Image (cartoon, rainbow, N blue to C red):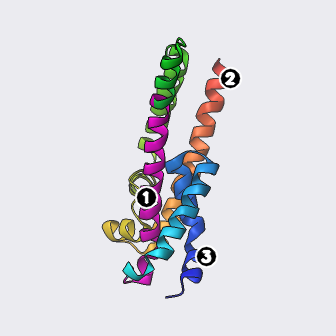
Amino acid sequence: MDFEKLANEHKDAVYRQMLRVCGNREDAEDVLIEALLKAYQHMHQLNDPAAFRAWLAQIARRVCWQLKGREALAPLLQLSMLEEEGVAMKDPKPPVDSELALRQMKELLENVVNQLPPSAREVFVLRDMEELSGEEVARRLGISLASMKSRLHRARKLLRERVDAALTRNAEEA
């Protein structure tokens, strides 16, 4: 198996997934690099080159979760250091208005996803929310991979348009 060829073919798709999982470009880039290194080191464990993207994505998700775990522990370490120095801490809760805005955005997204046509909603939920591979989504829905990609593209476009319209409407009302 030609690792370089497989990596070049699939790294962009895995990077886009990591943007969603990690939440920012810097972490997604770091995670992808680490995942590619781990994949290269364990390439002998991959039996089917067709499964490379899903395999690399799984490695990358694990790396991202490990990164998130370290980040989650960092505040505790900082807190204990500050307490040892006698520094008072402010309330760690986010302001009420940001919690409200986050809740409203979540409701808006849920409403927009629920209003997608059923075929678009199915593929969007399975692929982007449950993060199944394209091949697995196509298999579950009994459609070709090309059909799955086409539906996903339309679903994402429709979702962006509807979210933009809703946000514009909300801004005009405010």
Left or right: 164 with respect to 47? right
Left or right: 113 with respect to 171? left
The residue depicted at 62 percent of the width and 36 percent of the height is 165
Relative to residue 66, is residue 146 depicted above or below? Answer: below
The residue depicted at 43 percent of the width and 50 percent of the height is 66
Which residue is under mark 1?
127
Residue 1 visible somewhere in the drawing: yes
Between label 2 and label 1, give the one nearer the viewer.
1
Looking at the rendered structure, the secondary structure element under dot 2 is helix
Residues at discs 3 and 1 in contact (Cβ within 8 Å) = no
Disc number placed over residue 165 in the picture, else none:
none
Which residue is under mark 3?
8
The residue depicted at 46 percent of the width and 54 percent of the height is 128
Magenta stretch: dominant SS?
helix
The mark nearer the N terminus, 3 or 1, is 3
The mark nearer the N terminus, 2 or 3, is 3
Q: Which stretch appears magenta?
A: 47-76
Relative to residue 17, is residue 86 depicted above or below? Answer: above
Residue 92 visible somewhere in the drawing: no
Magenta run includes residue 51? yes
Which residue is under mark 2?
172
Magenta run includes residue 42? no
Looking at the rendered structure, the secondary structure element under dot 3 is helix
Looking at the rendered structure, the kind of residue marked 1 is Arg
